[in-house]
């Protein structure tokens, strides 16, 4: 896969869609219920994700599940910084999942190479200054409000066009604040202020976001819309951990559609999926259905 513009070499050299493994340092995550809340457990989990094929580790200390309340700034610092520092020292490519400029700054100083901001800079006006000053890779997600109100903000005329236009405005704003365009990655924000039905057009028309000329990150992992898709006869959505195979399917399709990275909780399935997608697209472009498959299967990750 070719990337639209240069990002740090450790984030582009594989020439395929990257896999970002989620490291939740929270007691109330929808996906894992706080299994990795203690720093030592979170670090061990991150290292395990690397061994399973993750290219990037996304460390977050504040849940963004629907209805979640914000945590104090000092508590978010306490949760994420020791984990980021330990994983970066171990050679991992680390991302910090935060909407706060102060946390982003401290995380970069601790070794993070990526700031993954689900608010796209709308939650903290100082975020863009941090991005501009540090030169960090910045993931700007489509967002309309914090977790406790986002479900009330899910009204669209055309969800694909509206999300594309709102992300384009985020890109314009961060560049106007002094960041370089090549620092920015865009994320459609699946599940954030979007009812289940609105997530599918965004995935089906991912090319509309790729067309903005920046790399695109897709975070479908274990989201509610997958749970409802897989619901049983009683209509009850399946549990988050039962959504991993569907997540891997989305990872494969997103990779074929040109996604730069997929953010997932269960790494092995998506690590396999993006490699299949790479082989598939390579064969379509070259006409050689086998060449390069073995080499790609043994390609080393940038972390470690």
Image: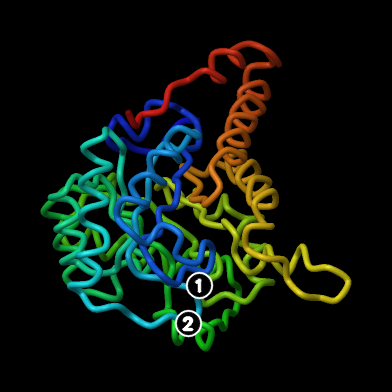
Mark 2: few/some/many CA within 10 Å (<14, 14-19, 20+): some
Which percent across, then down, holds residue 10?
31, 31
At 30% from the left and 62% from the top, the residue drawn is 172
Determine whether, in the image, residue 252 is placed left or right of residue 16: right
Q: Nearer the viewer, residue 136 or 210?
A: 136
Which numbered dot is residue 192?
Answer: 1
Indicate the secondary structure of the residue bearing disc 1. Answer: loop
List the residue tagged with mark 2. 150
Q: Nearer the viewer, residue 289 or 264?
A: 264
Indicate the secondary structure of the residue bearing disc 2. Answer: helix
Mark 1: few/some/many CA within 10 Å (<14, 14-19, 20+): many
Residue 145 visible in the snapshot: no
Which percent across, then down, holds residue 228?
73, 69
Q: CA distance from mark 2 to mark 1?
A: 7 Å
Which percent across, then down, holds residue 267?
53, 42
The image quarter in which residue 120 lies: bottom left
**In which quadrant is the C terminus drawn?**
top left
Residue 93 visible in the snapshot: yes
Establish if 177 lies above or below 115: below
At 48% from the left and 41% from the top, the residue drawn is 19
Q: How is the image coloured?
A: rainbow
Determine whether, in the image, residue 23 is placed left or right of residue 242: left
Instruction: Please say if the residues under marks 2 and 1 sit with CB atoms less than 8 Å apart.
Output: yes
């Amino acid at each position: 896969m070719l990337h639209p513009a240069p990002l740090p070499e450790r984030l582009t050299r594989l020439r395929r869609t990257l896999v970002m493994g989620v490291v939740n340092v929270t007691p109330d995550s929808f996906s894992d219920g706080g299994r990795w809340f203690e720093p030592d457990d979170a670090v061990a989990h991150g290292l395990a994700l690397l061994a399973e094929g993750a290219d990037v580790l996304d460390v977050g200390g504040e849940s963004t599940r629907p209805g979640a309340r914000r945590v104090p700034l000092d508590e978010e610092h306490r949760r994420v910084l020791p984990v980021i520092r330990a994983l970066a020292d171990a050679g991992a490519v680390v991302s910090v999942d935060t909407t706060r400029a102060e946390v982003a700054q401290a995380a970069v100083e601790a070794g993070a190479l990526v700031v993954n901001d689900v608010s796209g800079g709308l939650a903290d006006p100082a975020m863009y200054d941090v991005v501009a000053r540090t030169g960090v890779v910045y993931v700007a997600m489509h967002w309309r409000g914090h977790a406790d109100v986002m479900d009330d903000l899910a009204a669209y005329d055309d969800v694909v066009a509206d999300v594309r236009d709102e992300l384009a405005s985020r890109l314009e704003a961060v560049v106007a604040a002094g960041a370089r365009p090549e620092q920015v990655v865009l994320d459609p924000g699946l599940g954030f202020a979007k009812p289940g039905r609105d997530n599918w057009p965004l995935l089906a028309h991912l090319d509309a976001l790729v067309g903005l000329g920046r790399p695109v990150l897709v975070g479908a992992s274990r989201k509610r819309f997958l749970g409802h898709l897989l619901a049983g006869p009683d209509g009850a959505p399946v549990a988050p951990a039962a959504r991993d195979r569907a997540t891997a399917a989305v990872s494969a399709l997103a990779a074929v559609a040109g996604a730069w990275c997929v953010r997932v909780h269960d790494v092995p399935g998506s690590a396999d999926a993006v490699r299949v997608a790479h082989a598939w697209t390579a064969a379509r472009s070259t006409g050689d259905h086998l060449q390069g498959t073995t080499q790609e299967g043994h390609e080393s990750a940038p972390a470690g």
